[in-house]
Amino acid sequence: MNTLTRYVLRELLWPLLATIALLIVVGSTAQLVKMANEISGVGLSLGELVGALPFALPTFFARGLPIAFLLAMLVAFGRMAEERELLALAASGISMRRLLTVPLIMGTFLTAFGFLMTIWAEPRALEHLRNRLVESAADYFSRTLEPGVIHDQLSGFMLYFGARDEDGEVHDVVIADERDPTHARLLTASFGRIELAGGSRLSFLLKSGELQEGAAQDPTFRRITFDELDWRLDIGFFVWRAVSQIPMVNALPLSELYRRTQEGEQADRDWYTTWLHRKFTYPLANLIFVLLVFPVTTVLSRQSRLLAYVAAAGMVAVYFTMAEATATLIRLGFSAAAATWFPNLLFLAIGAALTTMRVRR
């Protein structure tokens, strides 16, 4: 590795690491606040939420690294242009083509790292995140149930019992389950037990009771009496439905995601196809942003540096807006795959044209 390569690499690496650290702190704080607001009803403590956040990092790296790398290039090449270092390099016979090699190599490495995150690490990490959240919530919910209180913090579910014996048996149990409004259930029992059934499930071991399903006026309404009933509730249903900013589709392995693109209604196939291709389009933004930012930052003057930052912020905003607007492109007649790749191809063409003009000067 020659002196120039080490110098440019160092100039890029430090702002990249600093930007990644800043984005992690800001992104994690924002995500923590949102998660705390959304799932506070199921009893997760702040410590449990903080401990679960590292499992969301692969999702962040897949989408946040291109932004961090873009900012690092703006800082590094912007400073070199402003202090006339690029002019000195050109006067020494070092071409822009040679200078471009280092960010291209870094962009390639970050792209490969992004693929590793989206294809391998993200599904595993999100599955761990899901299990950790729901198991903590199930344990909390089972430990904090009190007699004589209506427990309705879980959306669409209500539990009440009148008393609890010293051995843990509960009496006068009433359960209303309206998670599916078309198939509501009401359970009453004289006594029973509430226990963890493993993982995120609670087991209601009810005795001497009655189960009602559906509305009383509905022809499908059923009333069933029972001597014993083991009725189970999955706390994970409530937790993961609440954590809406982390799509659970990202937890699907690549093979399962591909299988779902081949099944079901067209709208479902398009939706899964979009998420499948995003596992590749987002990491590739690292290379695309090199071609966009390099020609802009290497012609900066002291007065135009702010303009370059504004232009870069605008490019990022437009790119990610288009990347999230695949549904609109599909309605305009694009296939789901074409709609997902369109922003990459468009910005790749623009970046390639700008970079070609810059290295030929």
Image: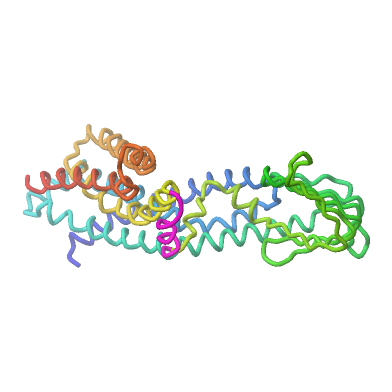
Pick out the residue farthest to the front.
219
Residue 6 place in picture, x, y as percent: 23, 62
Picture quadrant where residue 87 is located: top left
Picture quadrant where residue 298 is located: top left
Badge count: 0
- Image quadrant holding the N terminus, namely bottom left
Pick the front one: 225 or 302: 225
**Is 230 positioned to the left or the right of 298 in the image?**
right
From this viewpoint, is residue 212 visible? yes
Up-down: is 3 above or below 95?
Answer: below
**Is 185 positioned to the left or the right of 298 in the image?**
right
Report the colour scheme: rainbow
- Image quadrant holding the C terminus, namely top left
Residue 155 place in picture, x, y as percent: 69, 44
Any magenta on residue 135? no
Magenta stretch bounds: 254-265
Up-down: is 320 above or below 4?
Answer: above
